Image (spheres, rainbow, N blue to C red):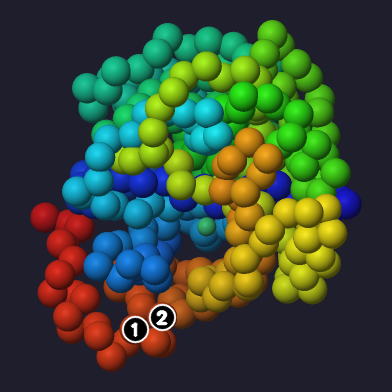
């Protein structure tokens, strides 16, 4: 199972796309690595943010549905998204976030790592984790945050469950994670990967929320290619899960299913990646559409707001 590499990407719902873009590029210092539309609803953007190369495991994406209701944390939801930052970057980030007038939590420790908690403009809970692993990974040299402090990739995600064991077993038996620690009702699962290697599950989560802006839509896990995706799909089908057909997302191939607690999981291939249709130094610079939508480009472009103004 060692070939499974943790989280591929996390996709959340936002409101105003301009505000979302400004926050994730200028405040969090991520790179917009792909600007496209929601393939199932081309009237809205699908914005992909990541590290300089857009590595799987560094990607947080958004569907900015401006007219959707505000969401709240709920059972059967991913309720926090965390990023890895180098251990020496705490003071920089505290100053930087305060300079942007953000309400941030006092840094605290969990499972041996120091964490700065904050919320994005739509209320999605984010955590910056001071992670020793980040110290040996290069940051984006040309980004808005000095390279030595920049986010390296996703650290992980927190799942809120009525009962942790269903998702926990799935992580251990099929997705290459191991239960490595537990504190009260919080269970820590880890796998070997530079990025996106941590899943925490809150057991007995007792808030009743709802989906909407500021909530996570789904979480995707990495497989190395389509063969591995098929073999994992077969195993999960045999176990009684319902999985979708393979969907071509242009930058990866995807299948989706719900874990026992109700969270939408995706299995996504590493290839072809974000350099499929843009050079590395041009990532995110123009609106990319799947071939089957190219003939509608002028209509789509007219409807979408500009992100930089
Ligand atoms: Zn996805």
Residue ID at (46%, 19%): 207
Q: Nearer the viewer, residue 251 or 106?
A: 251
| Contact flag, marks 1 and 2 (Cβ < 8 Å) | yes
Residue 248, position as x, y percentages in the image: 55, 75
Q: Nearer the viewer, residue 161 or 26?
A: 161
| Res. 84 visible in picture | no
Residue 70, position as x, y percentages in the image: 27, 35
Residue ID at (19%, 75%): 301
Q: Nearer the viewer, residue 266 or 221?
A: 266
Residue 86, position as x, y percentages in the image: 57, 31
Residue indicated by mark 2: 290
State how many labels appear.
2
Quadrant holding the C terminus? bottom left
* Depicted 60 relative to depicted 226: above or below: above
Q: Of the numbered discs in the image, which one, if any, rests on residue 224?
A: none
10 Å neighbourhood of mark 2: few (<14), some, or many (≥20)? Answer: some
On screen, residue 164 versus residue 35, left or right, reads right
Q: Of the numbered discs in the image, which one, if any, rests on residue 293?
A: 1
On screen, residue 7 versus residue 59, left or right, reads right
* Depicted 196 relative to depicted 247: above or below: above
* Depicted 81 relative to depicted 244: above or below: above
Instruction: Assign a secondary structure to mark 1.
Output: helix
Can you tell me whether the CB of the residue at mark 2 lies under 8 Å from the nearest atom of ligand 1? Answer: no
10 Å neighbourhood of mark 1: few (<14), some, or many (≥20)? Answer: few
Which residue in the rendered view is the most extreme toward the bottom? 295
Which residue in the rendered view is the most extreme toward the right? 1
Instruction: Assign a secondary structure to mark 2.
Output: loop
On screen, residue 243 versus residue 287, left or right, reads right
Which quadrant of the view contains residue 272?
bottom right
Residue ID at (52%, 60%): 53
Residue 240, position as x, y percentages in the image: 78, 54
């Amino acid at each position: 199972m060692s070939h499974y590499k943790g989280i591929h990407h996390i996709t959340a719902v936002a409101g105003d796309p301009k505000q979302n873009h400004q926050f994730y590029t200028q405040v969090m210092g991520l790179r917009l690595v792909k600007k496209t539309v929601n393939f199932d609803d081309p009237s809205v953007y699908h914005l992909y943010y990541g590290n300089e190369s857009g590595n799987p495991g560094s990607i947080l994406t958004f569907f900015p549905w401006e007219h959707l209701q505000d969401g709240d944390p709920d059972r059967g939801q991913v309720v926090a998204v965390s990023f890895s930052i180098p251990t020496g970057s705490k003071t920089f980030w505290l100053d930087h976030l305060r300079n942007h007038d953000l309400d941030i939590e006092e840094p605290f420790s969990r499972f041996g790592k120091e964490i700065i908690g904050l919320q994005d403009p739509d209320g999605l809970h984010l955590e910056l984790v001071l992670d020793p692993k980040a110290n040996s990974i290069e940051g984006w040299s040309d980004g808005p945050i000095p390279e030595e402090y920049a986010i390296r990739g996703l650290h992980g995600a927190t799942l809120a469950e009525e009962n942790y064991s269903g998702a926990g077993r799935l992580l251990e038996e099929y997705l290459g994670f191991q239960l490595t620690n537990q504190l009260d009702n919080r269970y820590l699962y880890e796998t070997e990967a530079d990025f996106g290697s941590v899943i925490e599950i809150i057991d007995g989560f007792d808030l009743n929320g709802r989906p909407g802006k500021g909530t996570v839509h789904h979480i995707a896990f990495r497989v190395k290619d389509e063969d591995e995706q098929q073999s994992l799909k077969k195993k999960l089908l045999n176990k009684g899960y319902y999985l979708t057909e393979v969907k071509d997302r242009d930058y990866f191939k995807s299948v989706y299913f719900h874990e026992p607690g109700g969270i939408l999981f995706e299995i996504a291939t590493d290839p072809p990646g974000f350099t499929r249709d843009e050079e590395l130094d041009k990532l995110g610079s123009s609106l990319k559409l799947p071939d089957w939508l190219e003939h509608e480009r002028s209509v789509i472009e007219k409807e979408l707001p500009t992100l930089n103004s």
